[in-house]
Amino acid sequence: MRFRLTPRETSFYDMFAASADNIVTGSKLLMELLGAEPSARGEIAERMRAAEHAGDDATHAIFHQLNSSFITPFDREDIYSLASCLDDIMDFMEEAVDLVVLYNVEELPKGVEQQIEVLARAAELTAEAMPNLRTMSHLTEYWIEVNRLENQADQIHRKLLAHLFNGKYDAIEVLKLKQIVDVLEEAADAFEHVANTVETIAVKES
């Protein structure tokens, strides 16, 4: 850990933790969507939209704090990158739920539940990791596991695409479902971007 002679603004740690906790809320709403009747999905989408707005507020609060702080706990560009990547995750999860509702999807293809389970696990790991930015401890296991989960998500995504193109679905349904599974894959990628940013911060601070 690098020794510092100057005080640092520590509220960023709490804000990153709050942002990550909100992502866990979003992942739980995704899980809820899986077991919901089509008629109940609109209400879930409303709650997801509220969570996404809360995520935007958390991101803007971090940016405001960044612009008003003379001394930051780590590099400004890394704070901006981490906040932006966390925000991306929430955006992708909200988009996926919204598409399910907008497209009136009756049944999600087999394999989507595996995508969402990976996202839920990555959300838990990310929420557990954010408080550790204070001490830069116990983070190596986090970014290794999130990278493993992202590789798993890639495999699930490829299998889902193969399933969608097997001739069972008509062309319009394929387009709808492919957009949904692609957005869920982007959420998995965004979790990896967060983990990579945390790794970069930890290396700089070591």
Image (cartoon, grey):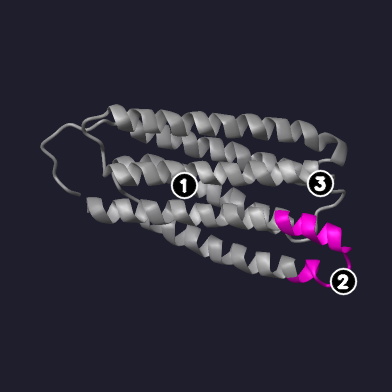
Span colored in magenta:
162-179
Q: What residue is shown at x 60% (from left), y 48% (from top)?
A: 120
**Which residue, given by chain and number where applicable, does mark 3 sit on?**
103
The answer to whether one can see residue 31 in this image is no
Left or right: where 161 falls relative to 168? left
Asked which secondary structure carries label 3, the reply is loop
Q: For residue 108, which numbered disc appears in the image? A: none
In percent of width and height, residue 44 lies at: 74, 34
Tell me the CA gap for discs 3 and 1: 27 Å
Q: What residue is shown at x 40% (from left), y 45% (from top)?
A: 82
Left or right: where 142 falls relative to 27? left
Instruction: Mark 2 or mark 1: name the one nearer the start of the chain.
Output: 1
In percent of width and height, residue 155 lies at: 63, 69
Numbered disc total:
3
Instruction: Mark 3 or mark 1: name the one nearer the start of the chain.
Output: 1
**Which residue, given by chain and number where applicable, does mark 2 sit on?**
167
Asked which secondary structure carries label 2, the reply is loop
Residue 43 highlighted magenta (yes or no) = no
Q: Residues within 10 Å of mark 2 (few under 14, many from 20)?
A: few
Tell me the CA gap for discs 2 and 1: 36 Å
Tell me the CA gap for discs 2 and 3: 20 Å
Left or right: where 74 falls relative to 90? left
Left or right: where 134 falls relative to 52? left
The answer to whether one can see residue 96 in this image is yes
Residue 171 highlighted magenta (yes or no) = yes
In percent of width and height, residue 150 lies at: 54, 61
Q: Residues within 10 Å of mark 1 (few under 14, many from 20)?
A: many
Asked which secondary structure carries label 1, the reply is helix
Instruction: Mark 2 or mark 3: name the one nearer the start of the chain.
Output: 3
Q: What residue is shown at x 89% (from left), y 63% (from top)?
A: 170
**Which residue, given by chain and number where applicable, does mark 1 sit on?**
85
The chief SS type of the magenta part is helix
